Each structure stands twice: as structure tokens, then as C-alpha cells.
Amino acid sequence: MTNKTKGRLVVAAIALSALAAGAGMWYAQTRAFYAPVMPDDPRAQITVTVGDRLQPLAISGFDGIDSNSSPIRYRACFAVDAGQEALLAEAERYAAASPLVAPAWFGCFDAEALGAAIEEGRATAYLGQRDFIYGVDVVVARDAQGRGYAWRQINPCGEAAFNGDPLPEGCPPYDPE
């Protein structure tokens, strides 16, 4: 075997290793940790906060994903059933709603379009549940066509606590254990 042939084999081995590592990283980031949320799963029950109570929102056509690797990987899409206007009129609005990007293969959840709809008033965001776990809220949004969306978002208390910063006024104490 010539040195030229050996060199080509080494280059080919390095290129194939890099390709395999890249494919593995892509799969881990976009697919490996996500699992579907079935309609009979408790995570498929969508609630909104009214006063100090969680009220179930009547929905249909639920499609959701979640991950055990992070509390903010939950995304859901659904149709808000007719007749929910009175409940939503009483529900607490979520002023800092910022939809988090979903994997591209979860096509019903377009975070950029949803964020723009919220900013432009074509969709409204509500507090689904405050502090689902410490520092993470469930946010629910409904657009003008009756489509609903849900995701989990880090709130200001969580952002400060997770960064090691002093907690803003009004935050409950944070115990990372």
C-alpha cells in the first residue's frame, strides 16, 4: 500500500467519523429526547389560571411533544372548542409570552409566527399554570381562528435562580435540591 493510498484512507476515516458524529449530534438535539404526548396523558389537559384556580380549557385535536431531558421542551397544538370565550375573558393574561422554537418536524408549532401573532394582537397568551416547577410557567395561547398552543417558559424568578442571581422581589425562595 502506497503512502498516497494510506493518506486517502486516513482522510476518508476522519471524514466518515465527522459525518457520523454530526449525524448523531443532530439526532440527539432534534429527535432523541422528544416523545409524543398522547391525548389521554395528564399533560394533554390544558388549563388556564382564573383567579387562584386552574380551570380546564375544552379542546380537541391535541398534538403534543415533551422530553424528560428538560422541563421547557413541552409543546402542544390543539383546537379551542367553541364556547370558551367567557372562560378566556376571565383567564390571567401572560404579558411576557415568548414561544419557544419546536423541532422542525413538529410542524403545527411555529414559534416565530405565533410570537408575531401575539405581538400583533392576532393571538392572546394566558397563564396556564404558574411555577409548574420552580421558575417554569405553562403558557397557553389562542389565535383568532381558535387554534391553541401551549409551551413551558422560564419566568423571571426561574431566570434569576438558574443564573445564580439575586431573586426579584416577590419570588418564593429557591432550593435547588
Image: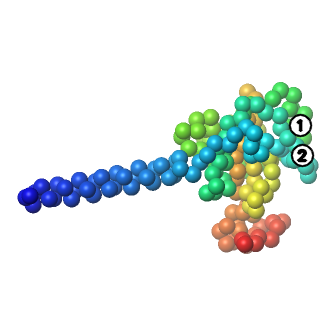
Crowd band around label 2 with a 10 angstrom C-alpha radius: few (<14), some (14–19), many (20+) = some
The residue under label 2 is 50
Per the rendering, the mark at residue 87 is 1
Residue 5 location (% of width, % of height): 12, 55
Query: Marks 2 and 1: in contact by CB < 8 Å?
Result: yes
Amino acid on which disc 1 is placed: Leu
Counting residues from the N terminus, which is met first, the one under dot 1 or under dot 2?
A: 2
Amino acid on which disc 2 is placed: Val
Residue 111 location (% of width, % of height): 62, 42
Q: Along the horizontal axis of the image, is 9 left or right of 155?
A: left
The residue lying toward the viewer, choosing from 138 and 19, is 19
Picture quadrant where residue 93 is located: top right
Per the rendering, the mark at residue 125 is none
Crowd band around label 1 with a 10 angstrom C-alpha radius: few (<14), some (14–19), many (20+) = some
Residue drawn at (67%, 72%), measured in percent from left and top? 164
The residue lying toward the viewer, choosing from 94 and 28, is 28
Q: Disc count in the image?
A: 2
Residue 63 location (% of width, % of height): 67, 36
Q: Considering only vertical position in the picture, is 132 above or below 90?
A: below
Q: CA distance from mark 1 to mark 2?
A: 8 Å
**Does dot 1 land on a helix, a strand or a loop?**
helix
Q: Check the picture and name the quadrant holding the N terminus.
A: bottom left
Residue 176 shows in the view: yes
Residue drawn at (82%, 43%), measured in percent from left and top? 47
